[in-house]
């Protein structure tokens, strides 16, 4: 009996010939990532060694990555002190994969890891962030864990007591017609199977429509797999994976494109033909409350957000700039743009995209998580409505439980910025 991609990765990482759903294993970790919540991990890690007399050294500093992105620049004294604590820990431990905003460097953790070549097919990657699933776009089995679990990883280099998940195979056929994008596909999928439809499962993406997607689009799919409850979202690595790692991430060492077996056993197969897929909208207050954009056109919007670890890449910014070129953001709305990394910020600036957006009336923010999680930058007032390319719209997600958040693609967001109401980008402005 064959194995899924997740089963192959976990078997190899746990030193076994094979594993099956329900098996409990302790896989070796190839990369462990944290952002500012590394301060919590440090506390737990220090507690592990308390009163032991042992040297509190991480198992392998070259396999730990820490990126400041959720609260950059620091919005208050507590954050600043935590960031100072992390910097000191990074220096003391010899951790080299450390990134913070510095000129055109740094950015969102889920962009920094791929674009720096830290993620490879077949890896086990864990992070103290639920959207660590993003890295499945490159064929790595990646999922989020808590601070206590991460402290154990820092100590042992393994994840303890992992139950092998079953896998749902998602087969996508047809040709995607602009301006429909990967964001519309993943919103449709979540709406179709619900926010609990893949609980404790792996979503494994197959089909010609997936193979034709750029790595940027694949990152969107894996990023939002967790919104269907999935432990991980895996795209089968292929020639595009290798192209991205070689040409954009600068990887020079050998790359193994690990594949699932043809006779792998899946818990369920979901088939989607995207030939006639419309732009999609996730309405408040759940990500699976998804409708075609035509059902919600005309809804007034107070704030537009383009960016985040979901849709802050260069192609996303390019789409927005093309729609807004020569136009103006409606006076009834505000528009914020968050490039996903300093590198993308620089590229978008060099290509003139940021100038177009600023001339249209958008405010271009520093690379980071910004208002996505409601910590700082771009808070909503009571009764206000945001239209965002981010990944969550739970009540209070963007900082105010008395506001509403709709989720969409960059094309829908940009078209709506011009009109001040939710707009179908296929209809013009």
Image (tube, rainbow, N blue to C red):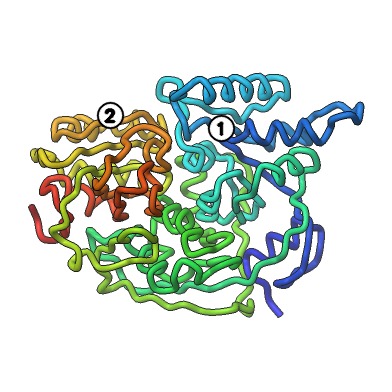
Extreme residue in the right direction: 53
Secondary-structure class at tag 1 = loop
Residue 368 seen: yes
Foreground pick, 186 / 161:
161
Q: How would you rate the neighbour count of disc 1 (Cα within 10 Å): few for under 14, some for 14-19, many for 20 or more?
A: many
Q: Is residue 411 above or below residue 276?
A: above
Q: Is residue 72 above or below residue 304?
A: above
Residue positioned 50% across, 55% down in the render:
137
Q: How would you rate the neighbour count of disc 2 (Cα within 10 Å): few for under 14, some for 14-19, many for 20 or more?
A: few
Measuring from the top left, give residue 219's x and y in whole percent.
45, 52
In this picture, residue 31 sits left or right of residue 427: right
Q: On residue 117, which mark appears?
A: none
Q: Which residue is mark 2?
A: 349
Residue positioned 40% across, 52% down in the render:
391
Q: How far apart are the two marked residues, 2 and 1, measured between alpha carbons?
A: 27 Å
Q: Is residue 38 above or below residue 387?
A: above
Q: Which residue is mark 1?
A: 36
Measuring from the top left, give residue 252's x and y in whole percent.
58, 39
Q: Earlier in the sequence, mark 2 or mark 1?
A: 1
Measuring from the top left, give residue 351's x and y in whole percent.
25, 33
Foreground pick, 261 / 283:
283
Residue positioned 67% across, 72% down in the render:
3
Measuring from the top left, give residue 175's x and y in whole percent.
30, 69
* Marks 2 and 1 in Cβ contact (< 8 Å): no
């Amino acid at each position: 009996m064959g194995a899924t991609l997740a089963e192959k990765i976990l078997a190899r990482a746990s030193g076994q010939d094979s594993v099956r759903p329900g098996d409990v294993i302790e896989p070796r970790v190839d990369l462990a990532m944290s952002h500012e919540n590394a301060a919590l991990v440090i506390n737990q890690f220090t507690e592990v060694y308390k009163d032991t007399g042992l040297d509190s050294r991480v198992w392998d500093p070259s396999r730990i990555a820490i990126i400041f992105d959720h609260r950059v620049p620091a919005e208050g004294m507590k954050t600043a002190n935590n960031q100072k604590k992390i910097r000191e820990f990074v220096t003391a431990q010899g951790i080299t994969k450390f990134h913070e905003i510095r000129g055109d460097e740094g950015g969102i953790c889920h962009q920094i890891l791929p674009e720096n070549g830290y993620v490879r097919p077949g890896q086990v990657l864990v992070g103290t962030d639920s959207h660590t699933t993003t890295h499945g776009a490159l064929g790595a089995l990646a999922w989020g864990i808590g601070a206590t679990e991460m402290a154990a990883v820092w100590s042992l280099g393994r994840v303890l007591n992992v139950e092998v998940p079953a896998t749902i195979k998602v087969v996508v056929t047809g040709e995607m017609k602009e301006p429909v994008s990967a964001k519309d596909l993943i919103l449709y999928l979540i709406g179709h199977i619900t926010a609990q439809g893949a609980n404790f499962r792996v979503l494994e993406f197959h089909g010609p429509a997936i193979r034709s997607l750029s790595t940027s689009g694949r990152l969107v799919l894996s990023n939002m797999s967790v919104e269907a409850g999935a432990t991980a979202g895996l795209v089968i690595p292929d020639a595009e994976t290798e192209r991205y790692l070689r040409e954009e991430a600068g990887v020079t060492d050998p790359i193994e494109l690990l594949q699932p077996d043809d006779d792998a056993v899946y818990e369920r197969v979901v088939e989607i033909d995207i030939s006639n897929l419309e732009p999609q909208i996730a309405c408040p207050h759940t990500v699976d409350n998804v409708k075609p954009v035509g059902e919600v056109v005309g809804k007034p919007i107070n704030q537009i957000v383009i960016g985040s670890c979901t849709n802050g890449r260069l192609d996303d910014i390019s789409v927005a700039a093309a729609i807004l070129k020569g136009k103006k953001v409606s006076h009834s709305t505000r528009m914020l743009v968050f490039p996903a990394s300093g590198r993308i910020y620089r590229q978008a600036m060099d290509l003139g995209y940021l100038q177009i957006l600023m001339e249209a009336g958008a405010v271009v923010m520093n690379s980071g998580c910004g208002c996505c999680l409601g910590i700082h930058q771009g808070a909503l007032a009571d009764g206000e409505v945001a239209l965002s390319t981010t990944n969550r719209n739970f009540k209070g997600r963007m900082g105010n439980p008395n506001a509403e958040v709709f989720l969409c693609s960059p094309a829908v967001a940009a078209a709506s910025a011009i009109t001040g109401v939710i707009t179908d980008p296929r209809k013009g402005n």
